[in-house]
Image (cartoon, rainbow, N blue to C red):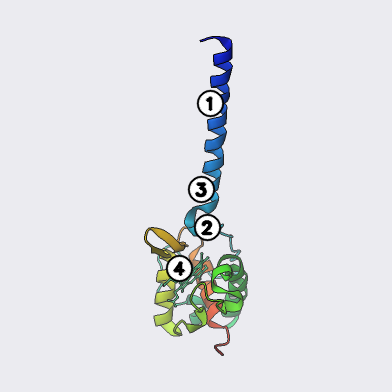
Amino acid sequence: MDSLQQSVSARLAAMSLLGLLILTSFSVVHGHGDVTPQAVNTEGLDPIGEEFVEENPYRLAGGKQYELAKAVGASGYNSNCARCHGLEAISGGIAPDLRLLEDGVFGDEWYMERVRKGYSQNGAYKMPPFQDLLSQEAMWAIRSYIEAQPKDI
Ligand code: HEC
């Protein structure tokens, strides 16, 4: 190989490496149904542990825990859910209106199922699974916020 050929093939290698890097960074950004998860600060909320519970523990606790959960949930909701489900849980039509979720434990179960596992159609996520992205505390805080929204639909 002469030196011209060598430098050409070195350049080609560098270019394809660059292309690969660009592709990889795109797929990282656009993985999980096109969502960049936002951490939710759940400081002050009672820890729930590893086991998933069936009913909103903060509603059950009531009082200050429930109030704090709604406030934490408001910011968690706005940064992770509102862009599909609408501000204040009022749907703009892309995704279901979450004010229609059932109250109580039945609504809790369905909520958790969807939020943990997301929703995919023909192999593409329409809603990303959040179980590895948000803590259980954050998920129940968001449920607390959603169920507290006025239901004048
Ligand atoms: C990329 C868009 C997107 C994001 C982000 C998103 N969702 Fe969804 N969500 C959807 C779509 C689409 C559906 C409808 C799936 C179906 O048909 O059940 C859905 C369904 C749901 C349902 C079931 C509603 C029902 O009436 O059956 C719940 C609960 C839910 N989402 C909660 C959340 C929460 C909480 C967050 C944030 C942590 C969130 N979603 C983030 C798109 C999204």
Q: Earlier in the sequence, mark 2 or mark 3?
A: 3
Residue 16 horizontal/vertical position (percent)? 53, 31
Q: Earlier in the sequence, mark 1 or mark 2?
A: 1
Q: Is residue 94 above or below residue 17?
A: below
Instruction: Say which quarter of the image contains residue 107.
Output: bottom left
Residue 65 seen in the figure: no
Q: Is mark 4 within 8 Å of ligand 1?
A: yes
Q: Nearer the viewer, mark 3 or mark 4?
A: 3
Q: Which residue is mark 4?
A: 115
Q: Which residue is mark 2?
A: 34
* Residue at (60, 79) in percent of width and height: 67
Q: Nearer the viewer, mark 2 or mark 4?
A: 2
* Residue at (56, 65) in percent of width and height: 80
Q: Which mark is residue 27?
A: 3
Q: Residues within 10 Å of mark 4 (few under 14, many from 20)?
A: some
Q: CA distance from mark 1 to mark 2?
A: 30 Å
For badge 1, the amino acid type reads: Ala
Q: Is mark 2 within 8 Å of ligand 1?
A: yes
Task: State the SS at label 3.
Answer: helix
Q: Which mark is residue 13?
A: 1
Residue 39 horizontal/vertical position (percent)? 58, 60
Q: Are marks 1 and 3 in contact (CB under 8 Å)?
A: no
Count of numbered tags: 4
Q: Earlier in the sequence, mark 3 or mark 4?
A: 3
